[in-house]
Image: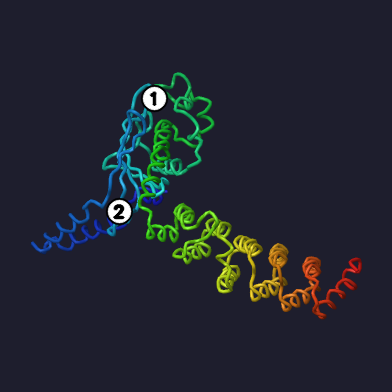
Amino acid sequence: MANRLEAIVQKPKHIQFLFLFSALLKKACWNAGILCVFLLVATTVFAQAPMKKKEYTVTINDTTEYTLQLAFDEGGQPLYYFSNLFTPVCLTGECKPVYINFYWDLLGNYTRFDFPKGAVLTRMDHKPFKPEDYEKLQDILANTHSLLKDVSMEDLVGKGTENLADSVDAKAGATLKTVKNEVIDGAVYTCYTLWHIAHGKVVTEMQRITETFKNEALLHRFLTDNNHHYQYWAMERVMNTEGIVALDFQSDMQQVIRGRNIFTARFALQKINVAFFADNARQQWLWETYQSAGYPLQLVILKKMATLPLTNTMAEQVAQQIGKSNQEQGSLLLKALATQPKLSEQTLLTLADQLANENFAAEIYRVLEARQPKNQTVQKKIVKFKQTLHPNNK
């Protein structure tokens, strides 16, 4: 639990390293003279140097606004948003000042919080949060589908609880009982207020700002990022409404399909135009992807193949795979063949050779019959199937 809490409020890695280096240098140079004093001062100043950032003002309502900051890397690429927040947490009674720093990714998805030096959160009885409270708060704030989204502050408490010293458990409103698992006892107001800041109007503003930084470099970066929100955002901008992928981003799309996230891979396969897999090389790549993919993605790939005009080479490999597949896979493989306007003689022979496979014989027979093959070997195998295995189909 403690390790997770540290992760929530950790400093960026480069800052952590610089402070560590500064501390080590101080210990090593304790008695080493002016040169080390100079180095110590220089590294400490460098460690504390402000990051590159740009500020924006976000207006919440007629009376509330705060500063949103966008951090950049040394190359001028945007990294994330953050805000040093001060907000009073209150309803009609006593108010508590809350100082907290929020962080979002470049699409406005809340990621974590930390605090200015010396700042803490407290419950209504002024007792400070425990480590487990901070961990639960992170879970609350990270839940974009929280029930807090659709309730008002007044809904959370019953009459007589306006004073923050009152016991929420003793005089809880009906709505509070519904969302009790999504708030911290004694800190209902705090949870509610902070959640609505994390997921409020600021999200739309961050999305608007990031759109202004859209360029090829950002799109490439987003497509290959582990953040699935970035991948969806970028895919919708490198494909047109017909699913045609811009030439410069086709290799990135292949990385998405072969990536670890099956949901982004499935989205890419479903949206991408069949022209993307028109040539034999790209179809071979898709087939190799199928063979190495997990089972759920294999099914998605097979469904995509049923929409493709397969090359003769690809159709033959599909036919050979049927007998090595389970019922679900085999049926999808046969569907991919059944949708082809034409199958080569070799592929028809490969299918006819599998008429003895009881799992797929009936489906294979239907595919062959629909083609009315002229090859005598195929015809003989069809007749044999009808006469010996399924005499009722004569």
Query: Which residue is at the front of the view, 372 or 173?
Result: 372
Query: Where in the figure is residue 280, as x and y percent of width and height?
Result: 58, 73
Residue at (57%, 67%) from the top-left corner? 277
What residue did someone put label 2 on?
72
Figure check: 165 above or below 272 = above
Q: Residue visible at 38% across and 54% down?
A: 214
Which quadrant of the structure image shows residue 323?
A: bottom right
Tell which tag, 1 or 2, sits nearer the viewer. 2
Q: Residues within 10 Å of mark 1 (few under 14, many from 20)?
A: some
Image coordinates for residue 12, horizontal then vertical, percent: 32, 54
Q: In which quarter of the image is the C terminus?
A: bottom right
Looking at the image, which is closer to me, 288 or 248?
248
* Callout 1 amino acid: Leu
| Residue 288 lies in quadrant | bottom right
The residue sitting at 59% across, 61% down in the picture is: 297
Disc number for residue 91:
1
Q: Which residue in the rendered view is the most extreme toward the top? A: 160
Q: Distance between the residues labelled 1 and 2?
A: 37 Å
Considering every residue shown, the one lying at the far bottom of the view is: 377
In terms of image quadrants, where is residue 164? top left
Q: Position of residue 240 (x, y in %)?
A: 50, 56
Nearest the viewer among 60 and 149 is 60
Give the mark count.
Answer: 2
159, above or below 32, in the image: above
**Identity, as a three-letter code, of the amino acid under mark 2:** Phe
Q: How is the structure coloured here?
A: rainbow
